[in-house]
Amino acid sequence: MEEIKDIKEIRKEIDGIDAQLASLIKRRLDIVGEVAEAKRKSGSPVSDPAREREIMTRVAEMVGPEYENGARLLFTTLFGIAKARQRAMICGDCGVVSAIREAVAHAEAFPTRAVVACPGVEGSYAQQAASSLFPIPTILFFTSFEKVFEAVEKGLCPYGVLPVENSAAGSVPQVYDLMVSHRFHIVRSLRLKVDHVMLANRGATLDGIREVASHPHALTQCSTFLKAHPSIKAVPAVNTAVAAKTLAAEGRTDTAVIASRACADLYGLDVIADGIADAAFNYTRFICISRKLEITPDANKISIMLSLPHRPGALNGIMARFSAIDVNLTKLESRPIPGMDFEFRFTFDFEASPANRDVLALIAELACDPEIEHFEFLGAYAER
C-alpha cells in the first residue's frame, strides 16, 4: 500500500517546484528583454499570434487533456506579461505618462472657489455635490448632462459636476455614453448622501396624489414605496429639482415629485412623505470634470477608458495586468459601442497613486498596446 505523504512534506515539495518556476519565469522574462531589443531593431510587431498558438499547442500536448485548460490560462497570462514588458522596453514613456508626470510634478491643492457647471436647477443633488466640493462655488445650471460636458470642453466653465452611479440604482449610462464624445479629465469625486422625500404643493395629501415626477434614477431608488402606492403613476423627469420647480409653478395638488428636502424650502413645497428610498444608506457618486489635466497631491484613484477586440480572453488579459501589480479595481463599467456588433468600451476605476512606477508602466503598456483599439486616461484624483 502506497504511503500517504504528510501535508508538510507535500507543501515542501510544492515549495521546491515554486522555486523552480520562479527561477524559470525570471529567466524567460530576461530573454523576453532580448526579444524586445531584437524586435525594436528589426521593426517587428510585438504581438505574434502564430507563435503563441504554436507554443499553446505544444504545451497542451505536454500536459495532456486533464490540465490543458489550466495550462492555457497560465500561458495566456504569461504571454500578456511578456508582451507588456516588450512594449514597455520598445515604447518607453508614452505621451500620456509624460503628461501625468508633468501634472504630478506641478500638483496643487484643489481650489476652494470656482465656476462650476451643473445639470438641473438650485436644489438638485448635483448642486449640493458642487457646493460640497467647492466651499465657494459660482454655479451655472444647464439643462442636460451633455450641456455640462460642452460647457467644460468649450471653456465656459473650468469645472463641471455630474452623477455617475448610485448605490441603489447603479450607473448613470447617459454620462458614461457621453464620456466617449467629449474631451475632459476627472479631477475629483464625491459620494453624496441622498435623502429622497415626496414633495407637493400646500393642501395636497398623499391619498390625493395621482402622479409623481422625478429623475428615473430617483424613481428606481424609491421603487418599494411606489409599489406600495400603485394608484400613483411614476413620470420620468430630466432632474429632481427641475421637477420640483415645475410643480411649484403649476400649483397642482394631484401631482407630486421625489426630490431633496432642500427643494421644499426653495420652492415652497410640503413634505408629504419621507424616508421613501429603498435603502437607508443611499449614496450617489459624482465626478468633477475639467478640460485640463489637474492632479492634486492627495490623488489616490485613477480612471481609464478603453475598447477591446471582440475575442475570448481579451478582458481577462487586461484584468490580469492589474492583478499582477496588486491594484484594486473599484469599478468596471461596460457600454456597447454604437455601430459595432457586440463590442464594448470599458471604464476602469482603480485605487492607485499616479506617482506609482508600476501603475505608470501599466498605463504606458495599455496606451501603446495595438490590440487595444481605443485608450483614454480620464484622470487621477481624490475621492471624498
Image (tube, helix red, strand yellow):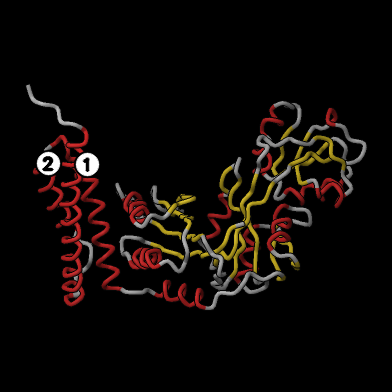
- Left or right: 256 in relation to 1: right
Question: Dot 2, how many residues are within 10 Å of its Cα: few (below 14), some (14-19), or many (20+)?
Answer: few
Q: Is residue 66 left or right of residue 73?
A: left
Which numbered disc flags the more N-terminal residue, 2 or 1?
A: 2
Task: Provide the secondary structure element on which disc 2 rests.
Answer: helix
Residue 33 numbered tag:
none
Percent of width and height locating residue 313: 30, 48
List x then y, in percent, for residue 133. Answer: 68, 62
Q: Residue at x 18, y 36 (%)?
A: 10
Residue 96 picture quarter: bottom left
Q: Amino acid at mark 2?
A: Val
Residue at 67% of width from left, 51% of height from top?
A: 192
Residue position for label 2: 63
Label 1 element class: helix
**In front of the other: 98 or 151:** 98
Which residue is identified by label 1?
70
Question: Which residue is situated farthest in the left direction here?
Answer: 1
Up the image or down, 179 lies above or below 219; here it is: below
In the picture, the quarter occupied by the C terminus is bottom right
Spatial CA distance of label 2 from label 1 is 9 Å
User: Where is 376 relative to 169, above or below?
Assistant: below
User: Which amino acid, by three-letter code, is at mark 1?
Assistant: Gly
Callout 2 touching callout 1 (CB < 8 Å)? yes
Q: Is residue 75 above or below residue 376?
A: above
Whether residue 335 can be seen here: no
In depth, the one of 12 and 214 nearer the eye is 12
Q: Is residue 180 depicted above or below 292 in this figure?
A: above
Q: Residue at x 58, y 71 (%)?
A: 291
Q: Position of residue 330 (x, y in %)?
A: 49, 50
Q: Residues within 10 Å of mark 1 (few under 14, many from 20)?
A: few
Residue at coordinates 89% horizontally, 44% vertically from top-left? 251
